Amino acid sequence: MREIVWDTETTGFDPKAGDRLVEIGAVELEQHIPTGRVYHQYINPERDIPTGAFEVHGLSIDFLKDYPVFKTVAQEFLDFVGDATLIAHNASFDMRFINAELNWAGLPQVPANQALDTLEIARKKFPGAQNSLDALCRRFGIDNSARLKHGALLDSEILAEVYLELIGGRQPDFSLSVVGSDNSGIISDNTWVAISRPIALKSLLTEEETKAHNAFVESLGEAAVWKFK
């Protein structure tokens, strides 16, 4: 079973009002295990970045203007996704934007039934509780200290850990071990058994992405406000 945990950053909340994608990040899972394959792309939105959006993700038009526009990378994104389930936190937000961009690019849209919303899962599992990504990290003891700003790839990595906790199977080192005679990793009651991996998986962020993220954070000053979808 192949799944893609993903996130987007945008210029605002509504593509119908002219808002555009500025970043896509995605992490591939196979049988709930990260494969190491990721998709990450900054996008030139061909418009200004409102102050509110900049405070969320720290991406300025000066930084983004040298990156490709969406239509030139759209097929690459679709090829990476394929027919995998797309897992996102508040999935309707990301699906609305990706399908608007695909429509403008003259490409087929992603079917709604291909999406899975971790926010809906969390609300059903913890009714009445705070279910933002950071709140879920606190609940599950997931380290999100690097999340100084919204970043699509970093948020996808963190969400993948949250997702595995929500379905009951994250290991401390973010991997699931195979148990049982059929090598499925599932025991008879349909739950995952977590066994420690001897060598933890390294971060999927590249050195270049880490440096770019740190540069964004420094440019924002002490008064920057962290906001949440």
Image: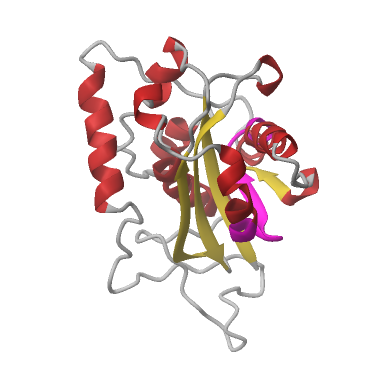
Q: Quadrant of residue 148?
A: top left
Is 224 displayed left or right of 186 in the figure? left
Q: Quadrant of residue 223?
A: top left
The residue located at (46%, 57%) in the rendering is 38
The residue located at (43%, 49%) in the rendering is 157
The residue located at (76%, 44%) in the rendering is 109
The residue located at (57%, 84%) in the rendering is 183
Is 142 displayed left or right of 112 in the figure? left
The colour scheme of the drawn protein is secondary structure
Can you say which quadrant of the picture contains the N terminus? bottom right
> At which x and y percent is residue 70?
57, 39
Relative to 38, is 185 above or below? below
Q: Is residue 90 magenta?
A: yes
> At which x and y percent is residue 162?
49, 46
Is 34 displayed left or right of 91 in the figure? left
Q: Is residue 28 magenta?
A: no
> At which x and y percent is residue 121?
65, 41
Name, please, the residue furthest toward the bottom: 181
* Between 18 and 7, the one nearer to me in the picture: 18
* Stretch in magenta: 79-93
Relative to 171, is 15 above or below? above
Relative to 137, is 63 above or below? above
> At which x and y percent is residue 153?
43, 45
Q: Quadrant of residue 59?
A: top left
Is 154 displayed left or right of 110 in the figure? left
* Between 209 and 61, the one nearer to me in the picture: 61
